[in-house]
Every structure is written in structure tokens, then in C-alpha cells.
Image: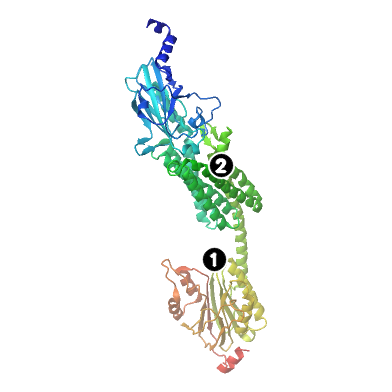
């Protein structure tokens, strides 16, 4: 024995001879930690006996866990990354495999612990001298549940401080993992052995680094929340801009993705199966589809309905295909050899979605060169982050970046750039909208000024008649119109009407009608002839109609009235019995109702548009004809009637006219003579 103490190398050689071909690593601890690079013994399959220290593993293969030169972590989260067993001669291996290593511990001063790697595929159990000391994942007779990997510290038994010990790691990997990750399988870094307190400090440093690097996830959630709020506020303000709605849905998808990423990183609340299905088969295809729809809606591309059907069909097929290549379907329900046709199918579907997006941007450039070119850069970045990441990883092109120690994957950078560009585009469109709104305000103001000229504010003074009017548009300009014209011979011609709708379009039609009234009355003042002329002017102008009546009152009080679907007037508080007729502009040869009656001295004729009857309160109750009749019998003025309807709840333009005959000394014409005169 004295030779072994004096010549440690000789002792080591003797130990190797005793152990046959077993893998062994001598570690000298003290206050240090040692990475167990091995080489480890490796064997496929599963047998609990392989955990025992006396098991003969001399026929097993070797697996060195020393980082090879040029190794590259495809996920970008670790600088020390070792390719898994699928890159080291076990391409089609999934399920169980074991690692074994004999260690000769020297100078162990206190309790020891083992820190397992932060990256493994996908679950493991750790045995020391045949005793289970820890695991990551759940191993049950029904199967294995795995989680997104995190480093785990497992304590060695108190009896293991110095001397020989056998460490065995029972690994399990889902059949779907190699499909979604290059170099998958087993341990991607060596376990670290050391004093328990020192190992725990290493674990704490890892979690500190993870929290520092992963703080971007929390920032991404905050950014998406802000973008979500802005998108839906803009959509609430402008329901016609559906692009804001789709942007909001896209933000919800990104928000959910970030929340589940945090849950996956810091907890074991969700299994790796659930996380993979949610991310890869649901959120990722859905988010990609929303990107296409958002840009298509933003650029208002033609045939948007057909695009919707194409996009959501591809998204559904892509989600199903990805689910078939993910746990628990892949390797259980879906055979592994189905990957031969599933992989090309997924590639084709992804390419179709990318081509649709690029087609939308191409159409956007043709429609608006500035907006299209602004959108091109983030879209190309998004397409690369979607489908080019694995190709870039294979070429060892970085798909992640560190700024001030914070980890930024390419997909997140693409999202940030896209949101920044979208913000610029929204600001640009908002400013354009502001200019258009100012332009429309100017046009509306000009229309209002024209309408003030067309609809008299100061009524003419006609001997023998007392005139009142009140016009209250629902908007700045309205669709009601009236004209009071003194005809030759002292007669009074009144025209009152209401164009369908209100606002600027209705005001433009009012201008046309009032101009036609003034033109026609220059050639005569017969009410029926006037309505026929107005009907010819309006017919064929689309779905624009107008109710209207015209009446002529001569100095003797004889009245001739022609009606085109308008409300009948009230004579001394009583509604006149007037047959209905078609509005102006509805039929080329429309027939209009005519009536002749006599207006005695002090008789009052009350006329109005339907905005009075259709006034509506907060409970949905109409002002109604009964209320109009009661007020008419109380001899209210035109202003009182209009005010009552407006206070009740104005919904449409309101116009009220009131005519009172106040001459009592004029001779009258017999009814038959008046009827004959009115038709000439």
C-alpha cells in the first residue's frame, strides 16, 4: 500500500484494472466543483439493474460529455452545449437510455451534491450506488411526463463523501423531440459534482442569469399589453378599420405565447407535452395566420374573403400536421416513419403561408409604395424567424442576440421591429385621416353655409299670412328642405320635404332639389306640375328618395296641395285626411295625391317632417303622432313643436312650418272654380 500512496498514478492504474473497462473519473473536490465529463458508459434500453454499482457495463459504448470544438446551441440559451445522442450515432433512438460513470472522490470535506444540466431531453432519474436520489419529470407505469428543462440540484447520500461511487442516469426522450430540435437526445452538458453549498451557489447563479436574460419575456408581455390596448382603442374609435381588430388578436396570441413561455421557464405547472402542443400546434400557426390577415386588411387587398378561407385552411392543416409530429401523438398514435411525409407536408404548408404573406406585401407596395416598402422589412424578418431559423442554425448563423446581457431571440426581435413599423404606419395613417377629416369638416362647413342660403332663416313677409319656421338638423347639415315663395298675384307657394338619410349626402341632394324648385317655379306655381318635375330630376340617381308636398294658397284662402309620400299637414290641430303616394325619385311615372281645400281667416296650417314623430327617448319610446296631435290642438308655435321633439330625443332632422291666414276681407272663389284653376 505504501507504493500506492507514494505513486498515485500506479494506484489509479490498479483501480482501472480492478474495474475492467468501466468508465471512471477521479475528482478532487475540496471547496471546488468538478464537471463529470467522463467518458460515461452509454447503453440504450431500460433495466433498473443498471443502476447497481456492481453491474458490469464493460460492453457498453462510451459517451464523452466534453464540449467538442465548434458545438453550437440551436436554442441560443447556453454557451456550453453538447450535441445529444441523435448526433452521435443514435439517430433514431427515442425512449430510454442509460448513462453510467464511476467516480473516485478525493478530499470531500462535507455533504456533496450533484447539479444536473440545464438542458436535457427530456426526463431523467439519478441513482448513486443503486439509490434513487432525484429526478426531473414524472416516471409512472403509464408513461413519462416531462417538462421544459431546468437545472436540478440533487443531494448525494451522507455516506458518499470520499472514495468510489457509481452514478447512473436513467434518461427518457419523447419520439417527437428530434423532430423539433437538432442534436436532440440525453444530456447536453456534464453534471457538476461538488460540495453541497457550492453547488447550490452555482444553481442560484444560474437562476440569476436566467432571470436577467429572461427579463425580456416580461418586457415582451408589457409591450404586447400596451399594443393590445392601443389596437382595441383605435378599433373602438374607428370600427371601419378592421386592421386594428386583427392587430389586437395578434397581440393576444403573442401575449399568451409570452405568458406560457414564462410558466414553462420558471415552473413545472405544465408538462412539456402540453407546452409543445400549445406553442407549436396552436399559437404559432394561429399567430402566423393573423399576421397575413392583418397586413391584407391593412392594405385592403381585394378578395379578402377568399384570402380568409385560404389562410385559415392552411393554419388548420398546419396545426394538425404539427400536432401529429408532437407528443403524445408522434411515436404512439402516429408511427415514427410517418415523418417521411409529415415533414414535407409541414414545409409545404409553411411555404404557402409565407408566400401568401409576401403576395399581400407585393399588392400593398403596388397600392401604396411607401407603406408597402415600410412593411417589407419586418415581414421578411418575420418570415425568416418563422421558417428560416432551423436553416440558419444548421449553418451556425446566430438566431439570437444579447444586448446588455439580455437574451433576444430572432422571433422576438422580429416582433419588436414589426410593432415599431406598424406604429409608424398607424401614425402615418392617423395623420392622413386627420387631414381627410379636416378636409371633410371644411366641405361640411361649406355645405352648411350653402344650406343656410338655400333654406331661408328669415321668412318673407307676405301680406295676409303669418309664417313661422324652425329647422334643426340632426348633424351640421341636414336632409330636410323647405321653400316659401311669393307667387304672382299675391299667392303663397310652400314646398316641404325630407331626403332619405341625413348628413352631407342628404345635404347635396337638398341643394339639387332646392335649385330645381326655384327653376320650376320661375315657369309656374302649380303644385302637381312642380312635383312631377322634381320626380324627373331625382329618378335614376340611385337609392335617393324624398318625401315632399307642395301647396299653393291664393289671397282668398283657396289651397291646392300635391303630396309625394309626405306627412299630411294639421289644419287647426286636426290631421288632414290625405291619401298616400310614392316619394319623389322612386318611379319615373309616379302618381301623386292632390287635394283642394279652403283656408278661412285665422285658420292655422301646421306642417312638419317625420323627424318630429320619430324622436326617441332613452327608453326607446317614440314622440309619436298622438303627442303631435295634442300639441297641435293647443295651438303651439313651430319653435315649441320643434323644441319638444328635440328635447324628447332627436334622431333625424326636424323641420316645422306654421302658416296662419290673417286677412279677413278677401273675396273667395267657389270650390268648383278653384278646383279648375288649380289644375291649370
Within-10-Å neighbours for mark 2: few <14, some 14–19, many 20+: some
Question: Which x, y percent locates residue 291?
Answer: 54, 48
Q: Observer-nearest residue: 220 or 511?
A: 220
Residue at 59%, 52% in the rendered image: 429
Determine whether the residue tagged by mark 1 lies in a helix, strand or loop: loop
Is 421 positioned to the left or the right of 41 in the image? right
Which scheme is used to colour this image of the protein? rainbow
Query: Is 329 placed above or below 53 here?
Result: below
Q: Nearer the viewer, mark 2 or mark 1?
A: 2
Q: Residue furthest left?
A: 159
Label whose residue precedes the other's in the sequence (2 or 1): 2
Q: Observer-nearest residue: 649 or 227?
A: 227
Question: Which x, y percent locates residue 256?
Answer: 46, 45
Query: Is 477 placed above or below 292 here?
Result: below
Within-10-Å neighbours for mark 1: few <14, some 14–19, many 20+: some
Residue 1: quadrant of the picture: top left
Residue 130: quadrant of the picture: top left
Quarter placement of the C terminus:
bottom right
Q: Which residue is mark 2?
A: 387
Q: Observer-nearest residue: 577 or 243?
A: 243
Question: Which x, y percent locates residue 663?
Answer: 55, 87
Q: Which residue is mark 1?
A: 475
Amino acid at each position: 500500500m505504501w507504493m500506492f500512496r507514494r505513486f498515485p498514478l500506479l494506484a489509479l492504474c490498479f483501480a482501472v484494472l480492478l474495474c475492467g473497462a468501466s468508465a471512471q473519473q477521479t475528482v478532487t473536490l475540496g471547496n471546488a466543483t468538478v464537471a463529470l465529463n467522463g467518458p460515461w458508459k452509454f447503453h440504450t434500453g431500460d433495466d433498473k439493474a443498471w443502476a447497481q454499482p456492481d453491474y458490469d457495463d464493460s460492453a457498453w459504448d462510451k459517451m464523452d460529455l466534453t464540449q467538442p470544438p465548434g458545438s453550437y446551441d440551436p436554442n441560443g440559451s447556453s454557451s456550453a452545449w453538447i450535441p445529444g445522442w441523435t448526433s452521435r450515432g443514435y439517430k433514431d433512438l427515442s425512449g430510454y437510455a442509460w448513462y453510467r460513470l464511476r467516480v473516485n472522490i478525493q478530499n470531500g470535506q462535507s455533504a456533496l451534491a450533484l447539479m444536473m444540466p440545464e438542458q436535457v431531453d427530456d426526463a431523467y432519474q439519478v441513482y448513486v450506488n443503486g439509490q434513487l436520489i432525484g429526478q426531473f419529470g414524472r416516471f409512472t407505469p403509464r408513461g413519462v411526463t416531462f417538462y421544459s428543462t431546468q437545472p436540478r440540484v440533487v443531494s448525494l447520500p451522507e455516506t458518499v463523501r470520499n472514495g468510489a461511487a457509481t452514478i447512473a442516469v436513467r434518461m427518457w426522450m419523447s419520439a417527437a423531440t428530434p423532430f423539433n430540435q437538432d442534436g436532440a437526445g440525453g444530456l447536453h452538458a456534464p453534471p457538476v459534482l461538488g460540495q453541497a453549498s457550492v453547488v447550490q451557489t452555482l444553481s442560484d447563479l444560474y437562476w440569476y442569469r436566467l432571470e436577467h436574460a429572461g427579463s425580456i419575456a416580461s418586457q415582451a408581455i408589457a409591450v404586447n399589453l400596451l399594443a393590445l390596448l392601443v389596437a382595441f382603442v383605435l378599433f373602438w374609435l374607428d370600427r371601419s378599420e378592421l386592421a386594428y381588430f386583427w392587430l389586437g388578436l395578434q397581440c393576444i396570441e403573442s401575449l399568451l405565447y409570452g405568458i406560457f413561455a414564462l410558466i414553462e421557464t420558471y415552473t413545472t405547472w405544465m408538462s412539456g407535452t402540453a407546452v409543445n402542443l400549445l406553442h407549436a400546434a396552436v399559437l404559432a400557426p394561429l399567430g402566423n395566420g393573423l399576421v397575413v390577415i392583418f397586413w391584407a386588411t391593412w392594405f385592403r387587398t381585394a378578395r379578402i374573403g377568399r384570402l380568409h378561407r385560404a389562410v385559415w385552411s392552411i393554419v388548420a392543416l398546419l396545426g394538425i400536421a404539427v400536432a401529429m409530429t408532437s407528443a403524445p401523438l408522434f411515436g404512439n398514435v402516429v408511427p415514427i416513419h410517418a415523418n417521411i411525409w409529415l415533414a414535407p407536408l409541414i414545409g409545404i404548408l409553411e411555404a404557402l403561408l409565407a408566400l401568401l404573406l409576401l403576395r399581400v406585401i407585393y399588392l400593398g407596395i403596388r397600392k401604396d409604395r411607401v407603406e408597402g416598402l415600410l412593411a417589407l422589412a419586418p415581414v421578411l424578418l418575420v418570415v425568416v424567424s418563422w421558417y428560416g431559423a432551423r436553416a440558419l442554425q444548421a449553418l451556425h448563423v446566430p438566431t439570437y442576440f444579447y444586448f446588455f446581457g439580455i437574451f433576444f431571440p430572432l422571433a422576438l426581435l422580429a416582433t419588436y421591429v414589426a410593432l415599431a413599423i406598424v406604429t409608424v404606419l398607424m401614425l402615418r395613417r392617423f395623420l392622413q385621416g386627420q387631414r381627410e377629416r379636416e378636409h371633410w369638416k371644411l366641405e361640411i362647413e361649406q355645405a352648411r353655409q350653402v344650406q343656410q342660403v338655400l333654406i331661408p332663416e328669415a321668412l318673407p313677409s307676405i301680406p295676409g299670412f303669418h309664417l313661422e319656421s324652425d329647422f334643426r338638423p340632426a348633424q351640421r347639415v341636414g336632409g330636410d328642405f323647405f321653400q316659401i315663395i311669393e307667387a304672382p298675384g299675391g299667392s303663397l307657394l310652400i314646398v316641404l320635404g325630407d331626403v332619405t338619410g341625413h348628413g352631407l349626402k342628404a345635404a347635396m341632394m337638398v341643394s339639387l332639389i332646392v335649385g330645381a324648385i326655384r327653376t320650376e317655379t320661375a315657369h309656374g306655381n302649380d303644385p302637381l306640375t312642380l312635383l312631377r318635375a322634381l320626380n324627373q330630376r331625382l329618378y335614376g340617381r340611385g337609392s335617393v328618395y324624398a318625401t315632399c308636398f307642395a301647396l299653393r294658397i291664393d289671397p282668398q284662402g283657396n289651397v291646392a296641395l300635391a303630396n309625394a309620400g309626405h306627412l299630411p299637414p294639421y289644419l287647426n290641430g286636426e290631421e288632414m285626411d290625405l291619401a298616400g303616394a310614392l316619394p319623389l325619385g322612386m318611379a319615373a311615372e309616379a302618381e301623386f295625391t292632390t287635394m283642394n281645400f279652403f283656408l278661412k281667416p285665422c285658420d292655422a296650417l301646421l306642417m312638419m317632417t317625420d323627424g318630429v314623430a320619430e324622436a326617441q327617448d332613452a327608453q326607446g319610446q317614440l314622440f309619436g303622432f298622438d303627442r303631435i296631435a295634442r300639441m297641435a290642438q293647443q295651438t303651439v308655435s313651430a319653435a315649441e313643436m320643434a323644441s319638444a321633439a328635440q328635447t324628447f330625443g332627436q334622431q333625424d332632422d326636424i323641420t316645422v312650418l306654421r302658416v296662419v291666414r290673417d286677412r279677413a276681407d278677401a273675396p273667395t272663389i267657389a270650390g268648383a272654380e278653384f278646383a279648375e284653376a288649380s289644375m291649370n
